[in-house]
Image (cartoon, helix red, strand yellow):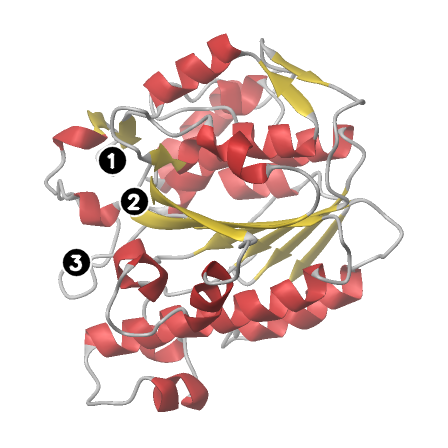
C-alpha cells in the first residue's frame, strides 16, 4: 500500500493547486473563531453508548446529548476507507474514493483554513511521517504550527497540554488533533480510571470499550478548552472503524463494520452547524460519508458550496475505497 501511495505521489506531486469548481470563499459569512477538527482512530460507533451501546463508554457525550437545547449532534457515518492513509487522503482533501487527482489539484483542508484567515495548528499523537512522502504529511506540511508527541508510549490525554499551549484567545484558529484513539493494542489505550468505570475480566471487547471511554474523557477536556471562547465548534470522527474480535481493520472483508464510525459535532457558536452537516446526509439512507468532511468544514469556515457540487458529493459518497485498491458501493457491503 505504501509503495502504491508513493507512485501516486510522484505522479501528481508537482501539480499547481487551486480551488475546486463550485467552492468560493465568502468573507461575509459568519464563521466560528475556533474550530477543533478531531481525528479519532479505529473507533466504531456501535461501541459508543451515545449510539445505544449498553456499556457506558461515552458518558461525556451522553451527558451533552441530554442538555436542552443540546449543543451536541451526532450522525450515522461511515468512513471512505478502512486504513488511515487511504481514509485521510480522502477526508482531508477534495479527492474521493473514485478519484485521487483532487488531492493534488485542489486545496486541502489546511490550505482552506489558511485562506479563510485561520491560524492552523496540527497536533498529533501518531508517528511523524515526512512532509513529502505521505498523504497526511503532505497536508500537515502547510500548518502554521505542528506538535507531535515524542514519547514512545503515547497517551492521548497529554495532547490537552499541547492544545492549551497553542490556544490564543485573540486569534482565529483551526486545530487538527490526530489521536491514537482505539488503535491496537487496546491495552495501551486506557488507564486505571477507565478500568474502574468499566470493570470485568479482560477481553478484547472490554479493553476496546475502555479505550472508547478514554477518548470520551479527552473530548471532555477539549470541550473545556473550547468553552473558553463563545464562538467555537468541535467536529469529531474516526478515520475508520474496527472489527474488534475478528480482524481489526485494514482487512479485505466486505463488512460495513469496518467502516461505521461516529461523527459528533459540538457547537458553541451562533452558527447553525447542524443545518450545514445535514446537507451532506444521503436522503435515501440517512447516512453520511466522512469523505464529505472537507465540504462541511469549508462551509463552517465561511465557504459557499453550490447545490450542484453537494449533489455530486452525495453521489461520490456512495462508495468506499478498499484495501485491494478497488472501489465498492457501501450499500453492497454486508451489514
The residues tagged by marks 3 and 1 sit, at their Cα atoms, a distance apart of 15 Å
User: Residue drawn at (79%, 59%), measured in percent from left and top?
Assistant: 167
Q: Residues within 10 Å of mark 1 (few under 14, many from 20)?
A: many
**Whole-percent x and y of residue 90?**
44, 32
Name the residue at the front extreme.
Answer: 68
Relative depth, front residue between 223 and 205: 223
Q: Quadrant of the C terminus?
A: top left
Numbered badge on residue 247: 3
The residues tagged by marks 1 and 2 sit, at their Cα atoms, a distance apart of 7 Å
Relative to 155, residue 132 above or below: above
Q: Is there CB contact under 8 Å for labels 1 and 2?
A: yes
Judge from the rendering whether residue 60 lies leftward or rightward of residue 259; answer left or right. Answer: right
Residue under label 2:
82
Q: Is there CB contact under 8 Å for labels 3 and 2?
A: no
Disc 3 or 2, which lies upstream in sequence? 2
User: Residue drawn at (67%, 23%), measured in percent from left and top?
Assistant: 303
The residues tagged by marks 3 and 2 sit, at their Cα atoms, a distance apart of 12 Å
Judge from the rendering whether residue 38 lies leftward or rightward of residue 256; answer left or right. Answer: right
User: Residue drawn at (25%, 53%), measured in percent from left and top?
Assistant: 249
- Is any part of residue 236 visible from this angle? no
Name the residue at the right extreme.
Answer: 170
Numbered badge on residue 322: 1
Q: Secondary structure at mark 2?
A: loop
Number of labels in the image equals: 3
Q: Secondary structure at mark 3?
A: loop
Relative depth, front residue between 278 and 135: 278
Where residue 79 sits, quadrant-wise, is top left
Q: Residues within 10 Å of mark 3 (few under 14, many from 20)?
A: few
Q: Is there CB contact under 8 Å for labels 3 and 1?
A: no
Disc 1 or 2, which lies upstream in sequence? 2
Judge from the rendering whether residue 42 lies leftward or rightward of residue 168; answer left or right. Answer: left
Amino acid at each position: 500500500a505504501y509503495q502504491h501511495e508513493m507512485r501516486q505521489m510522484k505522479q501528481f506531486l508537482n501539480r499547481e493547486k487551486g480551488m475546486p469548481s463550485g467552492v468560493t470563499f465568502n468573507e461575509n459569512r459568519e464563521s466560528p473563531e475556533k474550530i477543533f477538527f478531531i481525528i479519532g482512530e479505529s473507533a466504531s460507533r456501535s461501541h459508543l453508548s451515545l449510539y445505544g451501546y449498553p456499556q457506558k463508554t461515552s458518558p461525556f457525550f451522553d451527558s451533552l446529548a441530554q442538555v436542552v437545547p443540546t449543543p451536541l449532534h451526532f450522525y450515522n457515518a461511515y468512513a471512505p476507507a478502512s486504513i488511515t492513509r487511504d481514509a485521510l487522503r480522502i477526508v482531508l482533501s477534495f479527492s474521493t474514493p473514485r478519484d485521487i487527482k483532487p488531492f493534488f489539484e485542489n486545496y486541502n483542508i489546511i490550505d482552506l483554513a489558511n485562506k479563510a484567515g485561520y491560524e492552523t495548528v496540527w497536533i498529533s499523537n501518531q508517528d511523524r511521517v515526512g512532509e513529502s512522502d505521505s498523504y497526511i504529511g503532505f497536508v500537515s506540511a502547510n500548518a502554521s504550527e505542528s506538535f507531535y508527541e515524542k514519547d514512545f508510549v503515547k497517551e492521548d490525554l497529554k495532547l490537552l497540554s499541547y492544545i492549551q499551549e497553542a490556544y490564543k484567545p485573540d486569534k482565529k484558529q483551526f486545530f487538527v488533533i490526530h489521536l491514537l484513539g482505539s488503535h491496537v493494542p487496546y491495552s495501551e489505550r486506557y488507564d486505571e480510571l477507565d478500568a474502574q468505570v468499566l470493570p470485568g475480566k479482560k477481553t478484547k471487547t472490554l479493553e476496546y470499550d475502555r479505550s472508547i471511554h478514554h477518548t470520551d474523557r479527552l473530548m471532555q477536556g477539549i470541550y473545556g478548552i473550547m468553552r473558553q471562547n463563545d464562538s467555537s465548534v468541535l467536529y469529531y470522527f474516526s478515520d475508520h472503524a474496527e472489527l474488534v474480535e475478528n480482524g481489526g481493520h485494514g482487512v479485505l472483508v466486505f463488512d460495513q463494520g469496518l467502516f461505521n464510525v461516529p461523527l459528533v459535532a459540538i457547537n458553541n457558536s451562533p452558527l447553525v452547524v447542524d443545518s450545514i452537516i445535514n446537507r451532506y446526509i444521503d436522503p435515501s439512507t440517512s447516512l453520511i460519508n466522512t469523505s464529505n468532511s472537507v465540504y462541511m468544514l469549508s462551509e463552517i469556515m465561511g465557504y459557499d458550496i453550490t447545490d450542484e457540487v453537494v449533489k455530486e458529493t452525495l453521489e461520490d459518497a456512495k462508495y468506499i475505497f478498499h484495501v485491494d485498491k478497488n472501489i465498492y458501493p457501501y450499500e453492497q457491503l454486508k451489514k
